[in-house]
Image: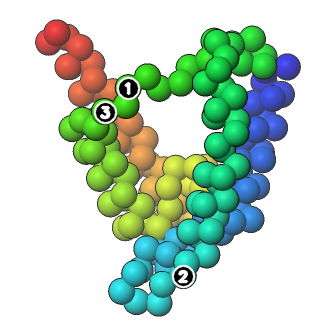
Amino acid sequence: MRKLTAFIAGLLFGLGLLLAGMANPKKVLGFLDLAGTWDPSLALVMIGAIGTAIAPLAWARQRTHSVLGNPMQLPAKRELDRRLIGGSLVFGIGWGIAGICPGPAVAILLTGHWQILVFMGAMLAGMLVFNALENRQGQRT
């Protein structure tokens, strides 16, 4: 049941990204181009996503277990630190350069466009570097 639920959630997420235009790098870059021909439509997508998430998140905060019985794992940390700011900067710079972020990249991976394959390779390399740095940090403490 958990795998089916995860599959359905992933399918809905991917379809939502495709329908919203988040998987189209030109649309994303148009949204990020504030000084040029700005396309505000993705701001509406983001507002809709935030509005849709408010009630389920409030519900989740009141629970210790998910509907399927897994422990609820919500972030407890609320302060800004170097890791959060640095990660946000790296993510934002990558999003601005490529016009794509990890969710949509996975959703359009099978299109075979070489740019997506390069992006996914760079993303996986970044994950490996992060894990290596985390392991190195853990060995010091």
Crowd rating for badge 1 (residues with CA inside 10 Å; few <14, some 14–19, many 20+): few
Q: Amino acid at mark 2?
A: Asp
- Alpha carbon distance from label 1 to label 2: 34 Å
Disc 2 designates what residue?
Answer: 39
Question: Element under label 1?
Answer: loop
In percent of the image, x 23 and y 14: which residue is there? 138
* Numbered mark located on residue 79 in the image: 3
Q: Amino acid at mark 1?
A: Lys
Marks 3/2 in contact by CB < 8 Å: the verdict is no
* Numbered mark located on residue 69 in the image: none
Marks 3/1 in contact by CB < 8 Å: the verdict is yes
Residue 128 place in picture, x, y as percent: 35, 33
Crowd rating for badge 3 (residues with CA inside 10 Å; few <14, some 14–19, many 20+): few
Question: Element under label 3?
Answer: loop
Q: Is residue 66 left or right of residue 22?
A: right
Q: Amino acid at mark 3?
A: Glu
- Alpha carbon distance from label 3 to label 1: 6 Å
Disc 1 designates what residue?
Answer: 77
Between 11 and 69, the one lying in front of the other is 69
Q: Is residue 113 left or right of residue 98?
A: right
Residue 27 place in picture, x, y as percent: 56, 76
Crowd rating for badge 2 (residues with CA inside 10 Å; few <14, some 14–19, many 20+): some
Location of the N terminus by quadrant is top right
- Alpha carbon distance from label 3 to label 2: 32 Å
Question: Given the current orientation, which residue lies at the most extreme left position?
Answer: 140
Q: Is residue 17 left or right of residue 84?
A: right
In percent of the image, x 47 and y 90: which residue is there? 37
Q: Is residue 32 above or below residue 79?
A: below
Quarter-of-image position of residue 59:
top right
Residue 97 place in picture, x, y as percent: 37, 67
Question: Given the current orientation, which residue lies at the most extreme bottom position?
Answer: 37
